[in-house]
Structure formats: C-alpha cells, structure tokens
Amino acid sequence: MTAQLIDGLALAQQTRAQVAQRAAAFEQKSGRKAGLTVVLVGENPASQVYVRNKVKACEAAGMKSELIMLPADTSQAALLTKIDQLNADTSVDGILVQLPLPSQIDSHRVIEAIAADKDVDGFHVANAGALMTGAPQFTPCTPYGVMKMLESIGTPIRGAHAVIVGASNIVGKPMAMLLLAAGATVTICNSKTRDLPAMTRQADILVAAVGRPKLIDASMVKPGAVVIDVGINRLDDGKLAGDVDFESVKPVAGAITPVPGGVGPMTIAMLLVNTMESAERRLV
Ligand code: NAD
C-alpha cells in the first residue's frame, strides 16, 4: 500500500481562487479592497519569508496588504501604539503580528491588544475561548487548513481517534478543539508524554506539530492512518523537512501530507479566508 498524497498546494490554489472571487465582489460593493496588515518585528529570516508569502498571497487574490517592518529593538509600548492605530483604521480588516517577537516584548500582551474582530490569526483570548465553546469568530489558520485537507479527501472524523503530537496555542490546542467539535476522540501529546509511539499507533488521524525533524517514523503509525505533518524544520543541508519521516511512513499510512507543499500553503490560504470573512462582516 502507498499512501494517498494530500496536495496542499493544489487545495490552497483552489481556496485562493475562491477568495479572489469574493475579494472582487467585496471591492465592487464597498468601493475598497479587503485589507490585511502584517507586522514584523526584527529580522528573523524564517519570519521574513513567511510574512512576504502572506503579503504576496493577499495581493494575488486582489486584496490590499501592508507589511510593517519594525526594528528588532522596538519597545513593547511602540508596538502597542502601532496596533492601536491599526485597530482604529477602517481600511484594515485583519491584523497579524508575526511570532516569535523579540524578548523585550510580551507576545500575550500584544495579541490581546489586537482588536478581536481583526485578529485573523485567531490567537486572541476571546477568539480562543470562542473556538473552545464552539462558536469561533476566527479559526487559527493552520488547524483550519488541516480540517480543509481532511475534508478534501473525505476523511471520516466522527468517532475516529485523532492523536495530536504538540500542544501549542497556535497549532496543537486549536487543532484538538476542531477535531473534537467534528466528533473525533482526541488525544493530545506533548514533550512529557511517556510512551509516544503507544499513543500515535492508536491514531486514525495523526497530526504532528512539534518542530522535530522525522520524529514520527513508520513504526509509530497505524496502517491506513491519515497523517498530517505540520512541522517545518530547516535541516543542516538547507532543505525543509517535516516532523514525519515521509519516505518511511508513506507505505504505511492511508494518506499523508508532504513538506513542503502540504499544510504550509493551506495556512496562508486560510489566512486569506479569515481576512475576507472579516472584511465581509464589516460590510453588513
Ligand atoms: P511549539 O514549539 O510552540 O510547540 C511544540 C509542541 O510540541 C509543545 O507542545 C511540546 O510539548 C511538544 N513536543 C516537543 N517535543 C516533543 C516530543 N518529543 N514528543 C511529543 N511532543 C513534543 O511549536 P508550534 O508553534 O506548535 O510549531 C510546531 C511545528 O509546526 C514547528 O515545526 C513549526 O515550524 C510548525 N508550524 C508550521 C505551520 C505551517 O503552516 N505548516 C504553522 C505553524 C507552525
């Protein structure tokens, strides 16, 4: 058996084309483009690539995108002032502050300063709470994209055992909430989990979101499982690798996402969806 490949690039392209149609309709109705502002503090090379890709994707979909680049020594107060300005700016539908932030800045404080109705990342405590109670305003982009990928191949979720490796606020925890809401039985693993392979081998749906290259090998995967690799790791040779040992797992899994070309492109596509939804809500 060899796993079905879940093509994140193709699905992201479809999603972005749908957003482009909505963006055009929005512009016609409102007389302005839907707008996302991305704020980057400092010069983290990976973050620079991520924010440029987000800005480019917005523009390609016919949305307005502004990139604000602030120096690494920006004070927390200065960043909060900038966010206040963006909150008040009616041409801005979505605000995204790229993480991680430099150590002098408390990222929780910054995320809480973003107006919840412009928090297209879905990280604000009001949005995290809304997701937990089942009425999300913005669903965090990466887990949202994963749900769309599962849907695209008709993965049965109700009653399935989903195991998530990684428990961060931006991936693991919201992923668990979404799968739970869709009827899965969910196990969340973290770095203290005693016997990780015993957990992952139970998974009908296995989501790896850790940041450790090739942590998940074939011996940890139940035959036929759907394996979603969220990890993005830069190897010494400069190549990108996921958290899943793709070559070893492919013959065992029922379906699998590649890295690159899997969850990454869907994350950006869902950011556009969230920004578009925010703009449309503002119209009515
Ligand atoms: P994080 O560092 O905030 O969280 C990692 C989680 O993994 C923690 O809960 C930790 O307890 C757990 N963990 C660490 N070692 C473990 C182990 N040996 N066994 C089990 N659990 C372990 O990371 P994050 O921000 O959630 O990101 C995770 C990965 O996903 C990273 O590689 C990141 O680059 C990637 N990522 C990708 C996208 C995308 O669009 N594809 C988006 C966000 C993050």
Image (tube, helix red, strand yellow):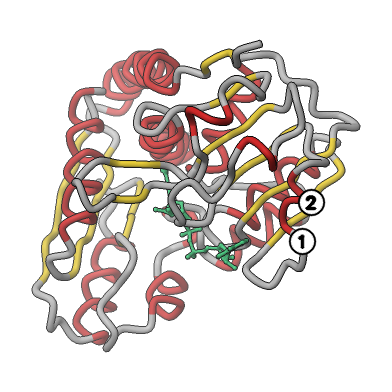
Ligand 1 lies under 8 Å from the Cβ of mark 1? no
The residue furthest right is 159
Question: In the rendered image of this protein, does residue 7 appear above or below residue 78?
Answer: above
Q: Position of residue 252 (x, y in %)?
A: 66, 24
For image coordinates 48% across by 54% down, the residue present is 117
Question: In the rendered image of this protein, does residue 210 appear above or below residue 61?
Answer: below
Q: Which residue in the structure is indicated by mark 1?
A: 195
The amino acid beneath tag 2 is Met
Q: Position of residue 147 (x, y in %)?
A: 62, 32
Ligand 1 lies under 8 Å from the Cβ of mark 2? no
Q: Is residue 69 left or right of residue 57?
A: left
Using the rendered view, name the quadrant where residue 35 is placed: top left
Secondary structure beneath disc 2? helix
For image coordinates 27% across by 88% down, the residue present is 104
Q: Which residue in the structure is indicated by mark 2?
A: 199
For image coordinates 80% across by 28% down, the residue present is 157
The amino acid beneath tag 1 is Asp
| Residue 101 numbered tag | none
Question: In the rendered image of this protein, does residue 238 appear above or below residue 25?
Answer: below
Measured in 3D between alpha carbons, the distance from the residue under mark 1 to the one under mark 2, in whole angstroms, is 7 Å
Q: Nearer the viewer, residue 47 or 33?
A: 47
Q: Position of residue 118 (x, y in %)?
A: 42, 53
Secondary structure beneath disc 1? loop
Q: Position of residue 132 (x, y in %)?
A: 73, 56
Callouts 1 and 2 close, C-beta under 8 Å? yes
